[in-house]
Every structure is written in C-alpha cells, then in structure tokens.
Image (cartoon, helix red, strand yellow):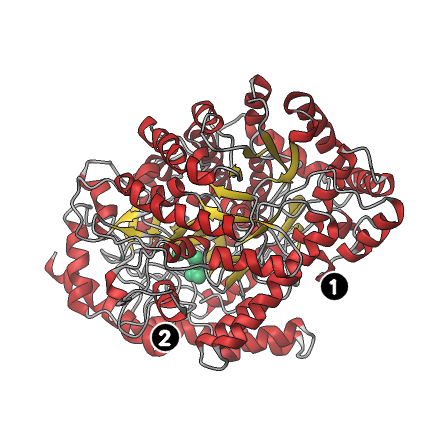
Amino acid sequence: TCPLRSVEEATERTSLLLSPTRTMASHIVGYPRMGPKRELKFALESFWDGKSSAEDLKKVSADLRASIWKQMADAGIKYIPSNTFSYYDQVLDATATLGAVPPRYGWTGGEIGFDTYFSMARGNATVPAMEMTKWFDTNYHFIVPELGPDVNFTYASHKAVEEYKEAKALGVDTVPVLVGPVTYLLLSKPAKGVEKSFSLLSLLPKVLAVYKEVIADLKAAGASWIQFDEPTLVLDLESHKLQAFTDAYAALAPALSGLNVLVETYFADIPAEAFKTLTSLSGVTAYGFDLVRGTKTLDLIKGGFPSGKYLFAGVVDGRNIWANDLAASLATLQGLEGIVGKDKLVVSTSSSLLHTAVDLVNETKLDDEIKSWLAFAAQKIVEVNALAKALSGNKDEAFFSANAAAQASRKSSPRVTNEAVQKAAAALKGSDHRRATNVSARLDAQQKKLNLPILPTTTIGSFPQTVELRRVRREFKANKISEEEYVKAISEEIRKVVVLQEELDIDVLVHGEPERNDMVEYFGEQLSGFAFTVNGWVQSYGSRCVKPPIIYGDVSRPKPMTVFWSSLAQSFTKRPMKGMLTGPVTILNWSFVRNDQPRSETTYQIALAIKDEVEDLEKAGINVIQIDEAALREGLPLRKSEQAHYLDWAVHAFRITNVGVQDTTQIHTHMCYSNFNDIIHSIINMDADVITIENSRSDEKLLSVFREGVKYGAGIGPGVYDIHSPRIPPTEEIADRINKMLAVLEKNILWVNPDCGLKTRKYTEVKPALTNMVAAAKLIRNEL
Ligand code: GLN
Ligand code: ZN
C-alpha cells in the first residue's frame, strides 16, 4: 500500500479502527496560508490590481482558513492554531495589532484596514513600503517593525480574536497564536532619526499593555490556550535580552491566569541559558521545542524539566518535505514521556509548516516511489496525529508499517545511492583544495590574455526575459515546438544580446541566460538526484512563493549543461564571453535537501558536478567563468557556535568547483547582498579572481569593511546601480559612486557592473542604464 493518503482517507480508516477518543495530544505550530494551489496569492494579486473586491479577498481567505481548521480537526489534532493565517505577514499583523503604524502612512486611528495594512507591506503611490527581511534562516521574509520612543501603541487590529471566534463558530476550539512580545521587539528596528541611545526593549511596558488587552479579549471569547511564538530564544542572546523575557512574562502573568500558555521556540537548539530562562517564566505552562534541529535541546530536557508543565515536542519537521521516520520519533517521544509524564507530552511540529509545501495530493508528476518518501504540510498533520495516537496506545499498525517500508525503500533505492559519487565526495573531505598560484599572479596572467581596460565593465548574467522568451521555453517544454525551433529562437536571442553589449561597448560579455527559467531549477533539471514538484510552493514574502527542487539522491552530471550555449555565444564575439553557472552552496540553500546525510556532503557532490562543467567550459575556450553564490550567506546557521563550520565547508565546496582551471582562466563569483562584513574573511577565502556584489542600496556599509583595512587583492565589482528599481541612474551619479569606491579600493582591482542580473527589467530601462554605466566608467578612466 502507498503510505501517502489524503487526510480524508486517513480519517475514514482511523474511525473504522478506533473509537474517536481524544486523549492523545497533538499540536501544529502553524500552517501555510497560500492554499494548496496558491489561492491566496491569486486573490491578493487580483485585489491589488483592482480586479476584485475586498469582499472577494476576504471570502477566499475565510474559505482557506475554514478548510485548514477542518482538515486538522478531522485528522484529530487537539491543539489547532488560529491567527496563523495572514494577508501578508504575521509580524506585520502584530504591528497592526499594536497600532505601531509609522507616521508616513497617515493612519489616524481606528481599526486598521486593508489600505493602511497593504501600504505598510507594499508601499503606495507616494510612500515606500516598510523594510522586509529574512525570518531567521528561512526563505520567508517579514516586515520589520519601525519603532521609536513616540509610538503610541493602541489595540488597532482585532484579527486574533476574530479568527478565534470564526473557528469557534465552525465548531473548532483553537489555540490563538501571537508573535511573542519580546521577539517582536527584538526583531524591530529603531525608526529613522531616533537617537542612538534609544533601546527598543524600553518599549516593553507599552507593548505589554496592548498584549493584555488582546489576552483579555481572547479569554472573554472563550480561549483556554494561547501560544506565543518566541523563536528569538534560540539565538545567542545577551543576558539583558533574556531578562526581558523574564520581565515580560512576569508582567503578563496576572492577565494570563486561568489560561494555559505555550511559549513556542523553533529553528535551532535552544541555548542552555535560554532554556533556563524559558522554563522559569511565570504564567507559562507549556514549552515548545524544535527537536528536529535541536538535538541538544533533547539533552537539556533530559537534564531537567519543570514538573507539571507541558512539553510540546516538535518531532515532525516543518522545514522539509520528507516523511517522518515514525518509529524513530515514537522512540524519542516515549523517552520523553518518562521525563515529563504521560499527560504532559504533546506531539508537535518542529516549527510552523509555513516553510514546507502544502499538499502532496496535488503532485501529479512525481512518481509513486518518490512520493512515498515525502510528506507535505497536509501529510505532516496526519503524521503528528499518528504519533500522538501511538503514544496513547492506539497505534495504527498499518500506517506505521507503510511508513517503515517507505523509509527502508528510500535507504536502499538505487535512485538514491551512486557509489562512485559517494566515494569521490568522501575523498574530498579531509583535504584542502586551492588553486596553486596566488590571486595577484593569476590576475596578471589573465590580464595578458584578456587585455581589459582599467575599470572593466560587465553585467551579472541575465538580460530581460520577455514574454516571447517565456512562451518559447514553455512551448518547448510542452513539446509544442521542435528542438530545432527552440534552439533557433534562443540562439537568435543570444545573438541579439551579444550585439547589444558590443554596441554598448561592454568589456566582458554575457549570453543573457534566455534558456533559464530559474538559476537553480535550470541546473537541477540537468543533474541527477533532483526531483521537481508542480505545486510545491512555499511562501517567500507577501503573495510571492518559490518552488524549491527536491534533492533526493546522490548528485551527478550526466552531460555538459551550459557548454553549448556559452560556446555559441562566444562564437558571436571576439570579446570575452563569461560562462555562467550557479554555485553548489546556492543550489543547496535554495532546494529542499536530503535529511539522510549532512548538508556538507550534498554540497560536495554538487561541487563535483559543477567542477566538471567548469572544466568543460574551459576546454571549449571560455576564459571567464562566473559561479554565482547568491545564497551563500543564507545558509549561515543561527547559532554562532555552528557558523565557522558551515563557512568552512561552504567555501571549500566553492573552491572545489574551480581548483582545476589554469591560471589564465578567470573565475568570477556573484553575491546578492552587501551585508557581508561579518563573513568577509570567508569571502576572501573563496579565492575567486573577481567578485561582483549587490551594493547599490548600502554603499557605505560595504565600503567601510575596506576602509577599516581589510586587505582585498582580488577583483571586485560592487554594484554601481540598483537593478531592483526601474529608475535610470544618470552618468554623473554612477561616476560619483565609482569615485567613492576608488577612495577605498585600488583602481586596478575595481570592476564596474550593475548590482544583480537584469532579468526582471525591461530593455527600455536596461539600454539607457547600461549606456550611462559604460559612459561613467569611461569618464573616470580618462581622469585616472
Ligand atoms: N547570474 C544570475 C542573473 O544574472 C544571478 C542572479 C542572482 O544573483 N540572483 O540572473
Ligand atoms: Zn544577485
């Protein structure tokens, strides 16, 4: 039998087998909001475009919430969350609840409606959006609260209590979820113009006053549980921050009396100090932990757990798409039962399921074997409940044995294991890999061959992706046009892009990436060990979702992936054509990865595949090769103690890709963020010949690293204009920035380039912008 069953089927079966007792305790930290087919995305975008009404949007949203609650209730989940839905972001929802609207949005009080809410999220005709940043180490982005001493906190959104009541009316008694007050403040930033000495935590009493009102409201509506998400507890916090937790919950305790209070943590091991703080909070009756990533947390729990308190044990992974190893989880849970007591153990997810795909039943293209290894959010609910039932003595033997069979098949499948690859990757680990010649000597050798002007100009890789291009790719994939027609169309596009760059007088050209839909998917589709979903979307921010590939097996490269297009592009020009690859760490960080081997192992395998590609490009006469590591920083572990190890293997994997090339082959890399001051030494350690980096929105930050004396001898191209905006930067403005860079960087290492790929821009923007960029470079060359 296939262990994958829809929730309906599972429920049907269990009700035949068991009386629907509810003694076992199961809980879900949070659930995806987008819907199994991204219903919320389409409703939001249609509303924003003025194509549908606010009522339409509310209706779609209410239907999604109802179906999620029903799904959990039917599966038998005891503690079902509410207020985990959001029109945009849960942190923005907390900002709305607290009435902490920055003055520029002109909100004058009253319940916050769509106008103010979406203006904060997305900006409006006159005011830009609030800043967005990554939610811990996930690919989800939240809206950063902007707070100053003058914020007048008032209870301005009753969403939490409304959703609680809405579920109750549907017959589901839920656990309302709030972003915890301390996490809220720790994730905020001081508003512009606020004095340096201002402390965000000084706002705690004012924030808590609103939280008390919300709690009172929830109590009045009949809530008996409440969940505060305080994931900042897993970070390395200074003691005054931990103290803020103690103070906050002591202050809330009277308001919370009579309620069961769960403080939920996730995404990493909780540090011992934070564990002590957490388990001593007053008014709190339950603690939630990520036991998938937090194996050391398990030891802390074993070392001592307060008696009479609940443990919400997050054993089902909220960050991945793999089926749980139910037998292993059950053993863990049984061990915990001995410590916390049978009636105090609740089976849960390791984090909100927001970070995984929604429902496997909508995967029409994955084969049954791979499907049997997977569990998306809807399946994880069933797993959580199956574990809870097993703990309470009602083990669904059929479900467990199907799961065990799937685990075994995954372990032994020849599709997963490729011994040659494993051997090659294992051989890499202990040793170091570096190009033999140092970077300045290499740059000299390359310059002899490339003969570039000073301040050479280049772009990051992609050129605008037109509607026509997308159509050609789509039709080729669907077998609607022949390979011959496809190659002809893409070749023509590449030729045009090359001609344009020659006209613009750019020095190092690119082919424009017209054959690529996505920089990871393109490579994943050509490597073995990858699978692709049709609906495996995960929310990235607002209505935007990503569909990460699934790496399920040992990775290898059956044949060259980019050599054909790069050689073709080179044949159109005498100028150097950059080969364009995605690096191993970025491929890893933007995929759902294997959980049956360390991330480093998988990355080394990808590195070997990319290495073969690099060497084939070199053989084909490509002398400049860019290996993008846009997401290298994203994989940085949350806990400081784990960061050095990550950077070590990540940088090593990058070096493996190009250790085999000649001195005269110039290796570029590109990174999509400028905030790398803290990892600058690792970036130098990548030993690329040239690095181009996103910079245009934060010049000062980046350049300060070099001003402070970090020695950088390789080529460097901090982006000279922002490609995220349609604005055309004037020549003088670009020249000005180049001059600023020259004040801290040697003229012979500086490159001139935009800050990222041009894929999302229009030709009407790209042509004048690049014209000005080249003009600025020439202007300064003449002055040097
Ligand atoms: N080479 C890629 C491009 O230009 C890089 C994209 C990125 O950094 N995210 O599109
Ligand atoms: Zn980029």
Rendered location of residue 261, percent (x, y): 52, 38
Which three-letter amino acid code belongs to the residue tagged 1? Thr
What's the residue at 46%, 26% (across, down)? 271
Q: Vertical placement of 170 versus 667: above or below?
A: below
Q: Nearer the viewer, residue 358 or 705?
A: 358
* 566 or 756, nearer to the observer: 756
Q: What separation in Å lies between label 2 and label 1 (alpha carbons)? A: 42 Å
The quadrant holding residue 132 is bottom left
Q: Say if disc 2 is inside 8 Å of ligand 1.
A: no
The amino acid type found where label 2 is placed reads: Leu
Tag 1 residue: 364
Helix, strand or loop at label 2? It is: helix
Q: In this image, 492 relative to 385: left or right?
A: left
According to the picture, the residue beneath numbered tag 2 turns out to be: 500
Nearer to us in this view, 278 or 720: 278
The mark lying in front, picked from 2 and 1, is 1
Nearest the viewer among 377 and 75 is 75
Question: In x, y percent, where is residue 631?
Answer: 45, 48
Where is residue 646? Give x, y as percent.
47, 34
**Which of the 4 image quarters holds residue 758?**
bottom left
Label disc, if present, on residue 161 of the rendered structure: none
Q: Residues within 10 Å of mark 2 (few under 14, many from 20)?
A: some
Q: Outermost residue toward the bottom?
A: 51
The answer to whether residue 475 is left or right of residue 715 is right
Q: Residue at x 17, y 39 (%)?
A: 197
Q: Is residue 542 left or right of residue 530?
A: left
